[in-house]
Image: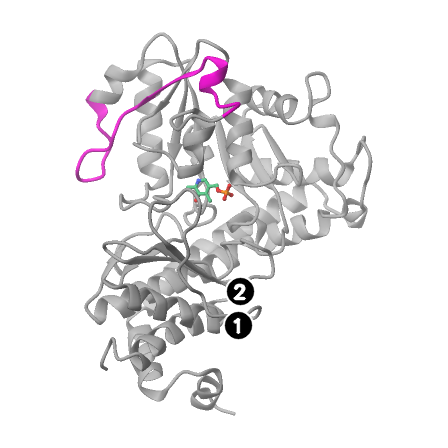
Amino acid sequence: MNIEETYRMLGVGEQVLRLGEEVLKELEPRFRGIDRIAEINQGKVLAAMQKNRVNATHFAATTGYGYDDSGRDTLERVYADTFHTEAALVRPQITCGTHALTVALSANLLPGDELLSPAGKPYDTLEEVIGIRSSPCSLKEYGVSYRQVDLLPDGSFDYPAIGRAVNERTRLVTIQRSKGYQTRPSFSVAQIGELIAFLRRIKPSLIVMVDNCYGEFVEENEPSDVGADMTVGSLIKNPGGGLAPIGGYICGSEACISRCAYRLSAPGLGQEVGANLGLMPAFFQGFFLAPTVTASALKGAVFAAKLYERLGFRVVPTGEEERHDIIQAVELGSRRGMEAFCRGIQAAAPVDSYVTPTPWAMPGYDSEVIMAAGAFVQGSSIELSADGPIREPYAVYFQGGLTWYHAKLGILLSLQKLVDDGLIRL
Ligand SMILES: *Cc1c(COP(=O)(O)O)cnc(C)c1O
């Protein structure tokens, strides 16, 4: 079977395939750059595993309290060495990215302290954690105040306003690397480093936390390399490599991480408890695969950008821009366009490929939302997935792809559905 037959079997017609191949030719230098970063990050992860003498005993399951869990402790050393930090907390008991961020914030903020976001509004779920939208057990309820400095219209940091916002109560600064589901640009590690240096000149005692969700292994460096005290993320995104079925991580200074451990378990217990429940093989192997899995997702994002740009759609970021996370937005301009795109992504999935995604009124959103995902791990967004609110500018946010070939198929099928529905003519 040749390539044309393979794609025909999967539902992609000749014209769509030909256009895809044309676009791919232009992307060769770009893909080499992505591979080069994956190579560097693969080296970092391997060196950390070798240095910590990872061996088969580390894959054993523990239960109950999990005292003397050498697999768990070694995994945390491997994360710490990869992120170049003193310590790390990497646990299945951290249920998601929001939970990891909540642990990091609530462990290091005390009543009377102020939290500062110098990069505008944080990720949706953090609004309730902070108390921007009121919620039981928010930081606000515990007497932690919040201040926000919005980004300038061009998406850059408003340094003078940030300078004015830091006061005697400011204790912790939260910086979100990825745009998430906003339209602002994502920040590079270098930009984050400049902001951290600026903040430290004003107030050296500040604790800086970076929400690193979707950013791991996209660049050669991580926020922890440019001065972040805590770098935080989810294991069902990049660093889990698609194999971790749950979990979150916090890498950072010994002082911050030990407080996080006391917050996660209990004062006095800290990092000593927390059984691994047999998840160590998935966590170690997923982390080992994460640099190349992230590269696959990045190739998918760049390919989607180039392909849809060529067809006249607005894409964020563009096919040429540097990447700082794995999210790609494509503005399809209509509800029907979003539905067709998502049908293609869904049809490409290894799981639930026969399902038709339809818009629904999701709690917490002011418009209907459509989602396409056929994942081995529920809700995993390092696996190929797309979603978006049904409203202007009718943008889908597309991310993931455990292998580049799967990401490629998903994008080709999304275009095929748009063509089949008469929304695009090739
Ligand atoms: C995914 C994400 C989170 C956390 O989300 P969970 O769904 O709780 O894992 C936080 N911040 C950003 C930028 C994210 O992309």
Task: Determine which of the numbered discs, if any, sits on residue 374 in the image.
Answer: 2
Q: Nearer the viewer, residue 23 or 417?
A: 417
Label 2 neighbourhood size at 10 Å, few (<14), some (14-19), many (20+)?
A: many
What range is drawn magenta here? Answer: 136-160
Looking at the rendering, in which quadrant would you find the C terminus?
A: bottom left
Q: Residue at x 26, y 80 (%)?
A: 422
Q: Position of residue 398 (x, y in %)?
A: 39, 59
Q: Is residue 387 left or right of residue 119?
A: right
**Do the residues bearing badges 1 and 2 touch, measured as CB atoms within 8 Å?**
yes
Residue 45 is covered by the magenta coloring:
no
The residue to which callout 1 is attached is: 353
Q: Position of residue 349 (x, y in %)?
A: 52, 70
Q: Amino acid at mark 2?
A: Gly
Q: Position of residue 137 (x, y in %)?
A: 53, 23
Corner quadrant of residue 261: top right
Corner quadrant of residue 408: bottom left
Helix, strand or loop at mark 2? loop
Q: Is residue 71 left or right of residue 196?
A: right
Q: Amino acid at mark 1?
A: Ser
Q: Residue at x 19, y 68 (%)?
A: 312
Q: Is mark 2 within 8 Å of ligand 1?
A: no
